[in-house]
Image (cartoon, coloured by chain):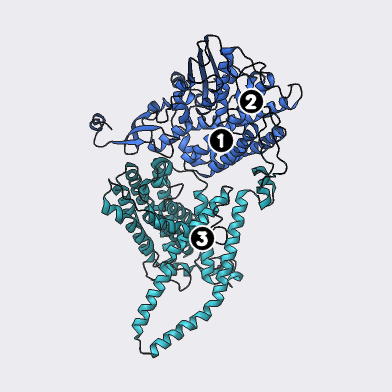
Amino acid sequence: MTKETSTAIKADQMFINFGPQHPSTHGVLRIALTVEGEVVIKARPDVGYLHRGMEKLFEARNYSQALVLTDRLDYTSAMHNNLAYCLAVEKLAGIEAPLRAQYIRVLVSELNRIASHLVFFGTFGVDMGAFTPFLYAFREREMALDLFEMLCGGRLLYSYMRVGGVSADLPPGWIEKCREFITFFKPRLKDYDTLLTSNPIFRSRTEGVGVIGAERAVSWGLSGPSLRGSGVNFDVRKNDPYCVYDKMNFTVPLGKTGCCFDRYYCRMLEMGQSAEMVLQCLDALSGAELNPGEVMAKGVPKMFKPAAGQAYAHVEASRGDLGFFAVSDGGLNPYRMHVRGPSFINVAILQEILAGCKIADVVAVLGSLDIVLGEVDR
Amino acid sequence: MTEETIQPKLSEPVFNHSNGRLLMPETRYWPTQMWKSPWSLPTYRRGAAVLAGLITGIAGAAWFLGEAGPRVAPLYSAAEQFALSKGVPAFIISVLWTFIKGAILLAAPLVNALFAVWWERKISAHIQSRMGPMYVGWWHGALQTVADGLKLLLKEDIIPETADKFVHMMAPVVVVIPAILAFAPVPFGNELVYADIDIGTLYVFAVGGVSVVGIIMAGWSSGNKFSLLGGLRSAAQLVSYELPRTFAVVPVIMLAGTLNISAIAGLQAGYWGGIIPRWLIFYPVVGQIAFIVFLIASVAETNRIPFDIPEAESELVAGFNTEYSGMKFALFFLSEFAYVLLSCLLMASFFFGGGAAPLPFLDFLPSWAWFLGKVLILMFCFLWFRWTFPRFRVDRLMDFNWKFLLPVSLLNIAAAGLLIWFLS
């Protein structure tokens, strides 16, 4: 704390460093809180404790090598990062992935969305003081991670996708395992509702707390479930379909008021929609019309030089609109790679909605925005 | 799971045909398999099964000891006769006996903590579809708490630089001593009471209230802003919930006509129509409301979820005990469980007839076995709440107390007056 800030605080106010070492900042976020008793007067999120210079690191690797960096951005939904990067580079180099690879990409994206939202569900419960949902969520997430492990050997950082497709086709027996998971998982959503969603204490903690109106949400550039919780119907999967999302049959759940509960429940409903999409993809992939084994575009070398130019591609990641902006100068490495991380943009709104909340609400609002610091700080 | 299912089948490795990676072994533990096997009932049923097993076991042990009890009593009187014949003055024997009895009965909160921590861990594990501690001790991690206690004893005792060292050191002491002293007038069964004083009820609430001072001391002296907030929250919460908790007992005192805890328990012996026990909880409306208010306020008094805002982990890190480590932390823990036990003992005495059997033909078990069984069921409620509910927000917590619990408990006192007038 500098001398200026210490003199600026009145005697009856208290300055609290909420983080970077705090159990519910979900990483190393620091929020500088000025509180008067239990009420927050001013809040300023302070990011950058996990900064690794990712965007610069992209420039020192060729396009194939740089893929592994994307896993480390939002590490709970690494598949989406892979996908957004691959789409941007494919657009830049004029490559198109085969249809089977596109189906697999959608499949693993939705599976990863389930795994990621389960982390949200568990940690949001812990933020509210309910520890039990956490273990239920992680029990189911473990099964999704096992499926990913079968697929690519990784359980957190997959690097499964490649520029031009995916690294391997689905192994034998995987589709049955995946169906088994979905049939196990779908009834669990009702369990979660009885355990946490319908709990009156939980409702009183989240309903009407941290309200973000639709206009404000748009003007701060929110995306993903945090935006749809405010009732704004924007989903990259619907509004700018990529891969085979235009062939998928799904609805986009919307909230009404934009309070913490709406954001929470949007994610819960999204998990059900993702499960449906996984089944649709499995149905398509189990047939023979999608040439089994053909998961890479032909003739993509390990090192390639796209023509000078720029390309932007975005996907609907678990936390929102994740975009990659790639610039090529005709060389082996990207000239510039910019990442539009949804968490980084979502975290900015904290400074506006936290003022006037209770200290306990800080945790609720932060949890409901569901940020991942790997993506915020990059 | 047996040994062989954990081992991957090395003879038949399965590889992914396209990238050559080893596939997930078929033997990998999947929850779907767990739900299919007979042991994997839905978790609440497992919790109930464990509870039933424990209570049956403890009741059986109590019955065994009750059989042995009459054989021990002659030993005591023989020892007394022997000492008297050797010329030892009678008052020395009585003083010694008081000390021995005191040591036995006041060790209850200490032994209770050992048991309750293990029980909480097992119950929470089964609620959360896990096994909990399984290795330390001979049976299902039974000695886990002993191991943890030893670890806490050996841990370095850290006093933060910014702490007020004397107050910081005294706080756990101020918390734990009243927690043990408050057990003095509580009956553990017929005749098993250390100080059978006539104002027992008042004494328990008065002494128990002192611990709040210790918690505020801990919060204030730690030199940590989160601790300070925790201390302030606990000051507000514990003082407010003291009121409905005490008012909830007033109908009990009115109906029983005494403040002596064992007398209150004793008055509830007998049965209406030979079937329904004359417990206070079966008094229409008044009894049930008093019990529920007392239960809620007791959970709040013991700082447990959903009322654990003074030590809210996700908001205040650990509130007033953030800066405590080693044995000092263990003392806070000890006092928490001591108060849980105390609340359950009081509830069993006030509302569930102490050691009275629930049905006339069941009184072949000794009174203290029934008492222990009731206390364990009530303790299970505390654990059950803790591992199911989220946490209240601090202002809702106060609203709930002042706008709901307190008016209800006051109305209940009036209702008790009407009931007494009606009965007479």
Tag 3 residue? B143
- Nearer to us of marks 3 and 2 is 2
Image coordinates for residue A300, horizontal then vertical, percent: 63, 16
Q: Name the residue under label 1.
A: A118
The answer to whether A278 appears left or right of A314 in the picture is: right
Describe the element under mark 1 as helix, strand or loop.
helix
Towards the viewer: A119 or A124 = A119
**What is the letter of the blue chain?**
A
At label 1, which amino acid type do we have? Leu
In the rendering, at what x and y percent does residue A263 appear? 51, 30
Of the pair B90 and B327, the residue shown nearer to us = B327
Dividing the picture into quadrants, the one containing residue A349 is: top left
Which tint is chain B?
cyan
Question: How many neighbours does mark 1 have within 10 angstroms: few (below 14), some (14-19), or many (20 or more)?
Answer: many
| Up-down relation of residue B221 to residue A96 (above or below) | below
Question: Which residue shows up at 73% across the image and 41% down it?
Answer: B12
Q: How far apart are marks 3 and 2 (CA)?
A: 50 Å
Q: Which chain carries label 2?
A: A
The answer to whether residue A294 of the structure is visible from this angle is yes
Query: Would you name the residue on which mark 2 appears?
Result: A167
Percent of width and height locating residue A116: 55, 32
| x then y, percent, for residue B72 | 50, 80
- Disc 2: CA contacts within 10 A as few (<14), some (14-19) or many (>=20): some
Residue drawn at 33 percent across, 49 percent down:
B235
